[in-house]
Image (cartoon, rainbow, N blue to C red):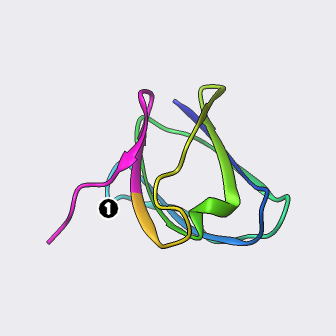
Amino acid sequence: MRFFVVSTGGNCWMEVRNYSVNGRTLYAGTLQLHQFQRFVARRLWIDFGSPGNVRASVNGQAVTIPGGGRTVAVQVTRQGVNLAPKTG
């Protein structure tokens, strides 16, 4: 699965982990306006701050990051982007 994300509306903090909440961290930082990141993985677990500031795609198809302006955790698979299950 290929995941692409670009900041189009302002800064967006992200922490991207491979496969699950306990997975290896692939990226942690802030996407500044117009910056982007690409990931190739079977599944990603991503915490977003200000997800409304980004546009994303999975395998070239545009997807919506749920959560609007608040912090949100999502799982990304080849089927798309969904809210991550609650942990703990």
Which residue is outermost to the right?
34
Residue at (49%, 38%) from the top-left corner? 41
Using residue 9 as the reference point, say whether residue 81 is left or right of it: left
Residue interval drawn in magenta: 74-88
Residue at (77%, 62%) from the top-left corner? 9
Using residue 57 as the reference point, say whether residue 6 is left or right of it: right
Could you tell me which secondary element the residue under label 1 belongs to?
A: loop
Q: Residues within 10 Å of mark 1 (few under 14, many from 20)?
A: many
Count the numbered circles shown: 1
Is residue 77 inside the magenta stretch?
yes
Using residue 75 as the reference point, say whether residue 9 is left or right of it: right
Q: State the residue position of label 1.
A: 21
Quarter of the image for residue 49 reads: bottom right
Residue 84 place in picture, x, y as percent: 31, 54
Residue 52 place in picture, x, y as percent: 62, 61
Residue at (66%, 26%) from the top-left corner? 60
Quarter of the image for residue 33 reads: bottom right
Is residue 17 inside the magenta stretch?
no
Which residue is outermost to the left?
88
Using residue 27 as the reference point, say whether residue 6 is left or right of it: right
Amino acid carrying mark 1 in the image:
Val
Residue 27 place in picture, x, y as percent: 58, 63
Q: Is residue 55 above or below residue 79?
A: below
Placement of the C terminus among the 4 image quadrants: bottom left
